């Protein structure tokens, strides 16, 4: 193979001659040169990529480290806040448990005062209240200390037990309230006491000689004599169902007390209540007088149940 070089300056040419071996070596040389360039480029690219990856990894690790640290600090803060909240709730729970114990004592005392022995508030048997051990220092049985930490399961278990306890106490107090109301209502509406303050008993319930006819007749009430204008009082709470004149009774007041009981106050000088008014026990309802079929100042007092006259001495105090 021949290669000829031409030069314009000197107008000469040069010829290079290659033998058959050079003809085969030249392509091999080009191939090796290309391979070397390729390998160098690949190595350079690999090193460059590795360096970039290292830089990215370092930056990423740094960012993750910072972010992880922030998350860790946040979690620690949240945990600390949660623990403080749980401790605060435990303290409040301790106060609630103490209130339950005081409620038990109060309920038992009220039941004893009201003679309601069928309701037990369990003061001798404290309610089952949960919580961590070592609860001392609060001064209340079954109470949690504010210093002791409590975990969520213990707190929830204690709250469940406290809820059941409060529900039980509410039901018992509701029953006791109903019994007390019934008992108080019965005391207020049952004829007891005296229809007039002072004075003296001038005529009893039963047969007597009638002061007008002189015949033996049945007297359906009792007479209490005193000076004119003496207050006449209701012997029980009730509703006024009559207030005005009635034949033989003069100025009469009738009070209905429920359960079939009615009381009558007759011969009044003046009635002080009207029909439909609610009167309390011992309320002044009239002034003693001498109206109607009467021989002198007094109050004629009757007690009826379901329309039948009863002896007032069995229901009221005449002392």
Image (spheres, rainbow, N blue to C red):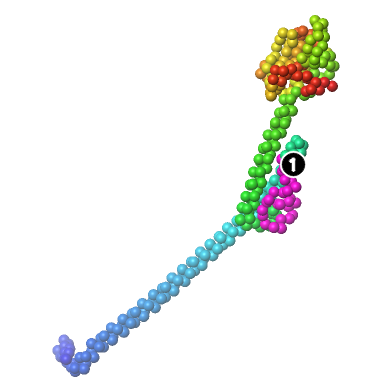
Q: Which residues are magenta?
A: 119-143
Instruction: Report the residue at 71% width, 52% height from top.
Output: 142
Residue hosting label 1? 108
Residue 289 belongs to magenta span: no
Along the line of sight, the residue nearer the viewer: 289 or 20 = 289
Along the line of sight, the residue nearer the viewer: 278 or 203 = 203
List x then y, in percent, for residue 99: 70, 45
Label 1 sits on a secondary structure element that is helix
When the figure is inspected, residue 304 is found, relative to residue 140, above or below; the finding is: above
Instruction: Report the residue at 68% width, 47% height from top.
Output: 96
List x then y, in percent, for residue 296: 82, 9
Q: Quadrant of residue 299?
A: top right
List x then y, in percent, for residue 107: 72, 41
Left or right of 171 on screen, residue 59: left
Left or right of 42 on screen, residue 28: left
Q: Quadrant of residue 311?
A: top right
Instruction: Label the magenta part by its dominant secondary structure.
Output: loop
Residue 132 belongs to magenta span: yes
């Amino acid at each position: 193979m021949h290669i000829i070089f031409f030069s314009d300056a000197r107008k000469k040419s040069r010829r290079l001659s290659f033998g058959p071996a050079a003809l085969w070596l030249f392509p091999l040389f080009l191939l090796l040169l290309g391979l070397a360039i390729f390998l160098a480029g690949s190595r350079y690219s690999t090193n460059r990529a590795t360096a970039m990856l290292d830089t990215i990894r370092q930056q990423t690790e740094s960012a993750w480290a910072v972010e992880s640290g922030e998350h860790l600090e946040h979690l620690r803060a949240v945990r600390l806040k949660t623990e403080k909240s749980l401790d605060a709730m435990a303290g409040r729970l301790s106060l609630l448990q103490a209130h339950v114990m005081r409620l038990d004592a109060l309920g038992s005392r009220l039941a004893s005062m009201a003679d309601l022995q069928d309701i037990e508030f369990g003061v001798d048997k404290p309610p089952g209240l949960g919580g961590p051990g070592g609860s001392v220092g609060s001064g209340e049985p079954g109470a949690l200390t504010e210093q002791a930490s409590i975990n969520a399961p213990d707190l929830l278990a204690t709250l469940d037990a406290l809820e059941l306890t409060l529900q039980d106490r509410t039901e018992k107090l509701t029953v006791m309230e109903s019994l007390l109301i019934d008992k108080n209502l019965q005391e207020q509406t049952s004829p007891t006491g005296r229809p007039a303050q002072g004075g003296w008993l001038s005529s009893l319930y039963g047969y007597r000689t009638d002061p007008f006819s002189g015949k033996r007749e049945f007297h359906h009430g009792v007479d209490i004599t005193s000076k004119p204008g003496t207050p006449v009082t209701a012997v029980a709470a009730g509703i006024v169902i009559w207030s005005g004149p009635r034949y033989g009774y003069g100025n009469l007041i009738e009070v209905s007390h429920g359960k079939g009981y009615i009381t009558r106050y007759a011969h009044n000088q003046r009635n002080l209540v009207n029909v439909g008014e609610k009167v309390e026990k011992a309320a002044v309802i009239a002034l003693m007088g001498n109206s109607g079929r009467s021989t002198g100042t007094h109050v004629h007092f009757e007690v009826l149940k379901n329309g039948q006259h009863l002896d007032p001495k069995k229901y009221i105090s005449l002392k």
